[in-house]
Image (tube, helix red, strand yellow):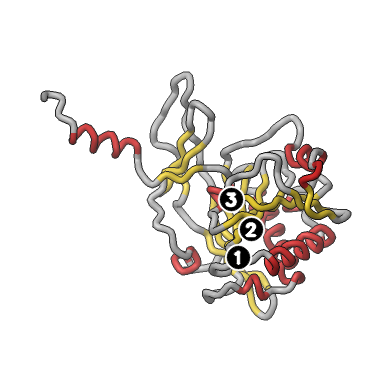
Amino acid sequence: MEEYRLNPLDFSFSLLSDEKGGCKECIYNKDEIKSIEFKNGYVKVYEIKDRVQPSKYELTGQFFKKSNSHGYEEIIVENNKHSPNLRNYSAEDIENLLLIISNRLEEIKKYEIGDNFSITRYVDGHDYWDFVVLPIPRHITEKCYVCESIKNIGNREVFRTSNISGYIPFSPNTNEILKIAPLKHTSLDKLDNVVAFDLSNLLMKIIKNIKRELTISIIQSGNEHFEVSLLAGNVDPVEALGIKRINYSPEETAKKLREEIDYGK
């Protein structure tokens, strides 16, 4: 079971989780909820249940509030074997996968689960996309921060077509290599073949030429302008949203300390 906590100082979120890691396709591949044609087989979608729960602690003081964190997670699997096939795919294969993910988001959005999502794919791992949708954190600003970032790229741009830009963000995360975003304000569920073509070709060049462990992360907030981040290493979708993963309970930690400390001495 996982639980989100709000930090009252900077209003960031942490995820309390006892997750041990491992391949989610191997753990959760019981019964697919959807099958989609891809190449000579099918992409299979598996729902990951009971992963995200609301906080059981009602913190109603001036700086606290309940973390209403019901969310949703599924994995989108295009191969049931452990092999880094993404490096062997063509740009057309990646384009088709992006369109499958776009159509899947369109189906999910009607349930109004949340406005923020992250889809990650570890290039050198098992062949699945980890798809998380959350109502938190809700980044909605007066102006779209992706549009503003593109307008103010300066000399940080690496690549541009008539449809997309690849650039180094002004304030990158520690493991962030590159961001790619549509020049036109575009929600991922409205992705068309033209943008998908440019995006897949750029991703193919990066995957083929950057010889290091990579995670592809597709992120969209409440402003509904998606962006793709290339991250170093194996990064899960929760961390890609900027949420810290904590593997202990503060309440249990306090209990253990109380038992260890003898106030009578």
- Mark 1 and mark 2 lie on one chain; the one further toward the N terminus is 1
Q: Is residue 201 above or below residue 186?
A: below
Task: Decide: few, some or many residues near mark 3? Use Cα within 10 Å; few <14, some 14-19, many ≥20.
Answer: some
Whole-percent x and y of residue 199?
Answer: 77, 60
- Mark 3 and mark 2 lie on one chain; the one further toward the N terminus is 3
Residue pointed to by mark 2:
216
* Amino acid type for the residue under numbered disc 3: Asn
- Mark 1 and mark 3 lie on one chain; the one further toward the N terminus is 1
**Quadrant of the rendered image containing residue 121:** bottom right
Whole-Å distance between the Cαs marked 1 and 2?
7 Å
* Secondary structure category for the residue under label 1: loop
* Amino acid type for the residue under numbered disc 1: Val
- Position of 5 compared to 211: left or right? left
* Amino acid type for the residue under numbered disc 2: Ile
Residue most extreme to the left:
265
Q: Nearer the viewer, mark 3 or mark 2?
A: 3
Residue most extreme to the bottom:
40
Identify the mark at residue 123; answer none if there is no mark: 1
Residue shown at 38%/47% (left/top)? Answer: 247
Badge 1 vs badge 2, beta-carbon distance below 8 Å: yes
Whole-percent x and y of residue 220?
Answer: 67, 46
